[in-house]
Amino acid sequence: GCDKFCSFCVVPYTRGAEYSRKVEGIFNEVKELVEIGAKEITLLGQNVSSYKSSVFEKKIKVEVNLAKLLKIISRIDGLERIRYLTSHPNDIDDDLISQHALNEKLMPFLHLPIQSGSNKILKKMNRNHTKSDYINLVKRIKSKIRDMAFSSDFIVGYPGESDDDFNQTLDLIDNVRFASSYSFKYSPRPGTLSSLKHPNIVDDNTASSRLQKLQSLLNQQQNEFNSEFVGNIEEVLFTENGKLENQYVGRTKYLQPVHVVSKSNIIGKTLKVHLRDLTSFSFHGSIKS
Ligand code: SF4
């Protein structure tokens, strides 16, 4: 669930209030999955970054936030990669940033939705943070973890979004540089605050042309991010068969898809791969080890 009540979102109504599962339950579930072959785990929640629970250590009750939970889970032998989804910028604290800096199992890729780069629209959305809060947070994280990359969510055409508001979003994207992102035209969800108020609906043509412009900038950034990896040798965790014979598909630590050809079954293996070519948003490579 979620306690944030962004004005466009149904989650607080459909999923209810935030609830954190117990540490032991999560630990045991991850351990069981690793014992039957899982190599990568994604902790999932709205908002996962506000996770709050407790454990007893030497008979003393200790608070457990997401950072501590990640530390506890990473002790499981055989677990290679940990991710978490979805975070709210206001819940990313120093503990979590330090955990990224210290914990090698924690992947350096953070999905951090912002939705808009305009302070006026962020306020209407009830996001409780500003554009500069977000930019400063990204800077703070990058100053501790140099190879950290970011993805985000964007809504264009939110009621009241002017050309200037939209340009603020483009400016934010220019400033942060995202590895990938999801973007949508605003559509009112029944029962949400924005669907009840909806003044200044942005006309559909304007919203469509803004979305096109925004996606072209995001695609350009994704392409630039990926291009820097061509020629690199990267660790890839293989998870499925490709469409061609003897082809396998895996993911880098940044979730970039990589296709290779192998005579033996490599599903479940993490291998070093030479990334030779980039086609659209995925790589073709050859196994080095
Ligand atoms: Fe909660 Fe995310 Fe929905 Fe906002 S957008 S209400 S933070 S789930």
Image (cartoon, grey):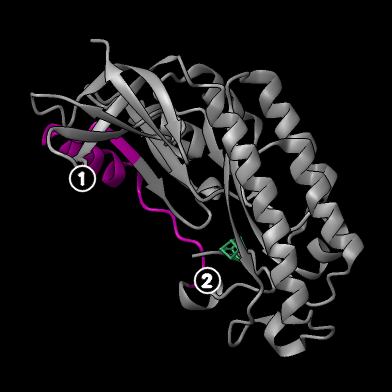
Relative placement, left or right, of 17 versus 126 is left
Q: Relative to the observer, which residue lies in front, 122 or 168?
A: 168
* Amino acid of disc 2: Val
Q: According to the image, label 2 marks what residue?
A: 11
Looking at the rendered image, the quarter that the C terminus falls into is top left
Q: How many other residues sit within 10 Å of disc 2, few (<14), some (14-19) or many (≥20)?
A: some
Q: Residue at x 74, y 44 (%)?
A: 173
Residue position for label 1? 243
Q: Residue at x 82, y 60 (%)?
A: 166
| Picture layout, residue 262 above or below residue 212 | above
Compared to residue 77, the image places residue 137 above or below, namely: below
Q: Position of residue 246 (x, y in %)?
A: 13, 33
Quadrant position of residue 59: top left
Residue 190 in magenta stretch: no
**What percent of the width, then of the height, locates residue 183?**
61, 59
Callout 1 amino acid: Lys
- Would residue 98 be visible to someone looking at this image? yes
List the single residue furthest toward the right.
Answer: 164
Is residue 39 one of those drawn in magenta?
Answer: yes
Foreground residue among 251 and 43: 251
Badge 2 residue CB within 8 Å of ligand 1: yes
* Residue range of the region highlighted in magenta in the rendering: 16-41
